[in-house]
Amino acid sequence: MSDSSRTLVSPHFLRIAMTALTAVLFVVSVMPARAGEKAAGTETVPDVEHRPNGVLVVEPGSPVDKRLVVSTVNVSKWNRGTTSPGTIVAEPARNVTVLPPAAGRIIDMTVKIGDHVQVGDELAHILSADVAQATADEIKARADLDLARRTLKRTQGVLSAGGGTTRDLESANTALIEAEAEEDRAQTRLDALSASTTDSGVMTLKSPIEGDVSVVNATAGMNITDITQTLVVVTSIDEVWAVADVPERDIAGLALGQPVNLTMPAFPDKIFHSTVSGITPIMQPDSQVLHVRAILPNLDGKLHPNMYANMTVMEPEPATLSVPQSALLMNNDAVTVFVEIKPHTFERRAVRIIYDEGDNCRVLSGLNPGERIVTSGAILLNDD
């Protein structure tokens, strides 16, 4: 047989076929007893009476009646998931790159990769001529400010004693204002270079956040000539982002706050739950995807940046009827169910359904809310 002539059988139809086989075995097991009764000349009442209008009446208390399970058709809410590949990334606000504030020579590095640091912990010590100059400027500015204050106070005393002039007082005030501005400038420059300096020009780099040292790109004795060179990266992964690329065909229903399910190869038996917290406004021109972001708590530290993650964005759909797949029967290429029109009385009805993963399926037409159908043992009524 050629490949083109092969027929693919749906797993759902296989399930129905297995149910039918079970029912046939049940009927075969009952037949000997019925045959024995007929041989003895005893008139029996059939378990199922087939009336001309297509209605089936089941004898109360019969073996078939005991095998039937009748349930109410329910209205259910469904979610349609759109799955896209993604990765775990560190939150940018919790991933800080520490740069050298000035050129110089590294005296020592006080941390290594993997170290946990608190805010203000020392990372490195750097000897810098720029820092030495800034420190000297600040010391001089502070001394000039002190002199300007004493000069103003002395001038005010002389003027109050009847000596000096108003011009002398104005000059002293002006000198004080200039000294204060210069001291502020020098202090700001020093603060910009380092949070901690010494008169000898040694600056101390400190951690701006609590986290783990993920990158160290310097060693003791190395000269720093490029102040854009990364020395240390401190990363906090107490909270991470899952970022996925959602293709253009699946973005119609995307919205902030939608439920998100995440699966990862590292945790094959676990589903992580979150919501859509961000959607990039610009589609990537080369791949026609939107970056979708979800936030994940990570207090135990098991989620690491650059791990793979599949993101399923759950898009709610209008509420629809649902029935168990065990209620479905095939009849002349149509999917049917048996509806209870009154106790122990049933009729066959064709339905349009959508198969979903799991035990239930959605009903598009053929049933109404509140109707009762045979959800188990329906094959026992199937005589077609």
Image (cartoon, grey):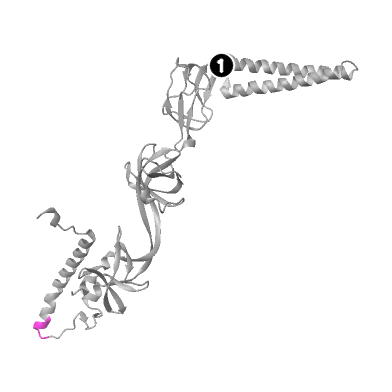
Q: Which amino acid does label 1 sit on?
A: Asp
Residue 58 visible in the displayed image: no
Foreground residue, 90 or 31? 90
Element type at mark 1: helix
Q: What stretch is highlighted in magenta?
A: 37-41
Q: Is residue 344 magenta?
A: no
Quadrant location of residue 201? top right
Estimate the x, y position of residue 328 in percent, counting from the top left.
26, 67
Give the camera-side residue of 349 and 31.
349
The answer to whether residue 124 is left or right of residue 37 is right
Residue labelled with disc 1: 130
Where is residue 183? Give x, y as percent: 67, 21
Q: Locate the C terminus and report the quarter of the image it occupies.
A: bottom left
166 on left or right of 254? right
| Quarter occupied by the N terminus | bottom left
* Quarter holding residue 168: top right
Answer with the quarter of the image where residue 182 lies.
top right
Q: Where is residue 218 in the image (x, y as percent from the top left)?
A: 43, 20
Indicate yes or no whether the magenta region holds residue 39: yes
Crowd around label 1: few <14 · some 14–19 · many ≥20 (10 Å): some
Q: Which residue is drawn at 27% across and 77% down?
A: 347
Residue 141 in the image: above or below residue 65: above
Q: Residue at x 11, y 83 (%)?
A: 38
Q: Exactly how many numbered labels are in the figure?
A: 1
Determine whether, in the image, residue 269 is placed left or right of residue 290. Answer: left
Residue 85 lies, in percent from the top left, at 34, 44
Q: Residue furthest front?
A: 285
